[in-house]
Amino acid sequence: MLGARGSSFNENGFGEPEQDANSALTELDKGLRSGKVGEQCEAIVKFPKLFEKYPFPILINASLLKLSDVFRMGSNFLRLCVLRVCQQSEKHLDKISNVDEFVRRIYSVIHSNDPVARAVTLRTFGAVAAIIPEQQQVHHGIRSSLDSHDNVEVEAAIYAAIQFAAQSKTFAISMCNKVSDMIQSQSTPANMKLQLIPILQYMHHDTNTALMVRTLCTELLPGYPSQDFVLVTLNTLSKLAAATLVDIPSQVNLLLHYLKNDPRWEVKLKAMQDLYELAKPGAHLWPSGSIEDIIDFVLNTKQTQILKPALSVIHILVESPIMCNEHKDPKSKLKELCSKHCYSPQPMVAVQAIQILTQILCYSYNENKPTEDADEVIHALETLILLLTFSSDQKHSEYLKVALKCAVRLCDAKPEHCETFVELLGTRLDNIDNDYTITICETLGAIAGLKPETLLPLVDSILSLIAALTQIQSPTANQTRTKIMLCTLIFQTLCGYYWNEQTWRTISNLVENNNMWANYCIARAAVRYGHHKIANQIFTMLTEQVSSEHFHFWLVCLKEMTEAEAGLYSADSNTLIDRLDKAIIHYNKAIAALKAASTPSYNLQFQAEYMKIRVEFLQCLVQLIYACNTLCIVPPPAIASTLVQYTRDEYQKHGYVTNQMRKCSVEFKNCGDLHWKLYQTAFDADPSTLDNMQILQQMCVLFEQCIDTTCNSTIKLREEPVEFSCKHTGLETKQLVKACEGIVEVTRCIAENSNSFMSHKQIEYLRKVVELVANAALPIPRYFFQVLQSTSVKLAISPQPRVLGEFISVQAGSQLAVKVEGVIQHGMKPGMFRRIEEVIITVTSQLQSNTKNKDIENVKNVELCSVLTQTVAPHKDFFTAQFLLAFPKGGQYLLVVEAAVIDEHSNTWKTGPRSTLTVKVPDEPKLTAIAVPGMATNANMILMPEDNMFLKPHQKKII
């Protein structure tokens, strides 16, 4: 079950011990020093994995220097292995500190008499061009090798020239004439010219060079009309235009010219491919009338092979609002083209036409433009979906997914279309063996997330399908997944509704005849939508059916948590306190089980904090009920009127209950702060999880304001109690949103009945709002179970103590230089929700103990705590920061190094990690006056250290 969060195995295997960086490097160094070529090669190929595991500059610098020695002294085969290491470790190359030494060792091979050795050297320089873009000796070596008589060396020089031209403006400009002369020279072979032309695509560093290159290439086109030259030259010109942007209009016209006039279909297809790449920067850069030229060409041609790339180009262009606005008219040529092909017998063509029409229609909906042909688009899309679902070709499954995405986009832009597509897709849920059932279920789930009530007419059909799947004795993997999807649809549709007997019986029968992992997935989906009762039944069944002790306690945790949430709901308000107390007890059991389920690989920190805050919130609700009961049980004291006059607080006339209510307000505020702190640590959480935590925090704020409105005269109700909006929240948080809206309404009612005293009517309102929140099912967020994006920050701090756990000694009056290096590590899908733009490193120095110097005045005058902060931008997932710390007093200091990250939207996330070091600074010796006999009174005072280190044991100290 925990395996859904990621893999816990290290890359060394199952039984091999984990090595540190030094041990791994030492072991590989032994392989490099071996006399056997096989062992040397084996050691070399392990370096890229070593760099990924320990991507710190000191290790990478040492490793590449060792590899450069092997390159200098080894055979061509070993040099080729080193070349592969450099190519695979491109993002770590800029961590080499001794670049000159690395280049010197590699460059020594360029003088070899072996052309193969020189070729491998040139390719190695090309692989590391990013760190040596301005090395003049390497530039000279590349230019010299271009004149070589060995084809292998020349090809390697061309490869290196391409890499350096992409990195160095100086090299690109200096090579422009050389490459131009070689291309125009009659002695240069044709195949070599084809390799040289791509170098020109990087000559965009200044306007004059780009213009010269463009002029050269356009002159080459008529001079070398063969197909290979035309394809390579057009590709070079297109990439050059995409880099400069100013040449996009002229390049588009050139490509359109070849598209219309060149009879070779390979050239036409290449022109379309380049137009597709030039469409990505934006339609606003294209010359006017260019899209009409493409449409006219497609309408007039009888060749279908050009239709698909043409529609792809138009699809990219209509992503621009300008293009949608120009072609929204039903009589436009673009609409005519798409309408002609949306019923095409070729599914790919029909899907592309539908995509274009959907994009324009969604634009019209969002901008409130007239949509006269909306029905035609809907009918065409429905027809396409039906045809694809009846098709038996497996290749059409991808086209069906694209068409269904268009349907979801239309439903999102205009919710009135939800009923239409739900009714259509419901007719295709009649066959459990259909290969497209899962795709249709996913689409229905997406529509249910937008408008869940539209799936209510399909409940009976879905339950019938579930009952049919239950009868299958040995279901396939596809059928098992279909069961999970159908149950999820039921949970989505019935979110916030009561379950009837048929629904409960059908789901229970399915669970009894299902495999364990599928049951776990069903229960996980149930708690996401607040159906805790059925989830508790499933988790109870699974508790004793797992092979690991950690999995057992994880399931016990889920069982106790769902039992707590399921027991909260009841129509009897008299049992509210009992229900809350039982829920708190079950949650405490769940937290205890979660501690037993935690492992070093899975610390389950988010889950533990989330449940602790939930317990804190439930305790706040209990305390609020007790405070409400206090008004009826505890009368105000006899000195209440005196307290009112003394404190000038009218609410003090109620006595004890006033302070209790205000204490509850503070507790709700603290609970909201805990939600915010947990929110800041959830950098990898999905948007739905973040919405969940935000709404729970807002709920605490609403409770705080509701209580303050009851018992605090200084709180004035605003027009809206809080800025609460449920526009972008999903189906999972639907009931929490309703509960928050209920709190807002109760707050208004309390404010309307506020007369500077607490009435029983107001207290009754507070009890009702507690009942309302207790009955609102808590959706457990997805991040509780699954981590879709995994990002971690790894720090290396220097200096480190020689022995782990010991302190670092610093001389009194000196400063300590602390260097913090860090690496950002990603999971399978980096940047899925957000990515790291900057890292904040904070170093805190705190004096812990001062054993000898007890002078209070000195303690007051010296700042004993310092906080230094530095914000750095990671480069290829690596960052470094340096701090200079001063220690004004002797004693023991605790250094805390903590990292936080900033995402692309400038939001700060306190992700950690947090490391500590201990620094010991010796106390400065205190000087004492010692009298020397025979000297004057004012001159006989000699300053000596306070201790007796200069006196012999039999001597006495002279005062």
Image (spheres, rainbow, N blue to C red):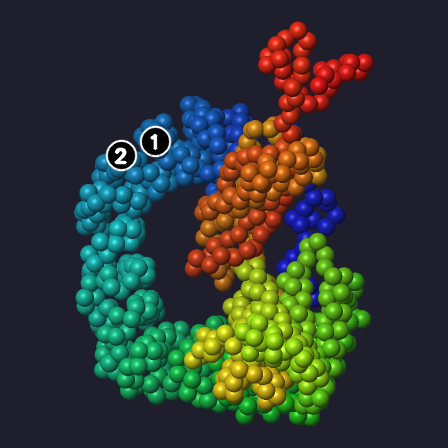
Q: Residue at x 41, y 39 (%)?
A: 130
Q: Nearer the viewer, residue 132 or 80?
A: 132
What residue would you read off at disc 1? 139
Marker count (numbered): 2
Q: Specify whether residue 922 is in view.
A: yes
Q: Residues within 10 Å of mark 1 (few under 14, many from 20)?
A: many
Residue 264 in the image: state x and y as whole percent. Answer: 27, 60
Q: Residues within 10 Å of mark 2 (few under 14, many from 20)?
A: some
Q: Residue at x 26, y 71 (%)?
A: 323
Circles 1 and 2: CB distance less than 8 Å?
Answer: yes
Q: Residue at x 67, y 16 (%)?
A: 930
Q: Nearer the viewer, residue 683 or 406?
A: 683
In the displayed structure image, the side of residue 224 where residue 588 appears, left or right:
right
Q: Residue furthest top?
A: 934
Q: Residue at x 44, y 89 (%)?
A: 420
Q: Nearer the viewer, residue 876 or 464?
A: 876
User: Looking at the picture, does residue 235 appear above or below residue 542?
Assistant: above
In the displayed structure image, the side of residue 143 where residue 786 appears, left or right:
right
Mark 1 residue type: His
Q: Quadrant of residue 5?
A: bottom right
What label sits on residue 626 in the rendered view?
Answer: none
Residue 795 in the image: state x and y as whole percent. Answer: 58, 44
User: Looking at the picture, does residue 754 appear above or below residue 900?
Assistant: below
Q: Nearer the viewer, residue 346 or 853?
A: 853
Q: Secondary structure at mark 1?
A: helix
Identify the image quadrant of the C terminus.
Answer: top right
Mark 2 residue type: Ser
What residue would you read off at disc 2? 174
Q: Quadrant of residue 768?
A: bottom right
Mark 1 / mark 2, whichever is N-terminal: 1
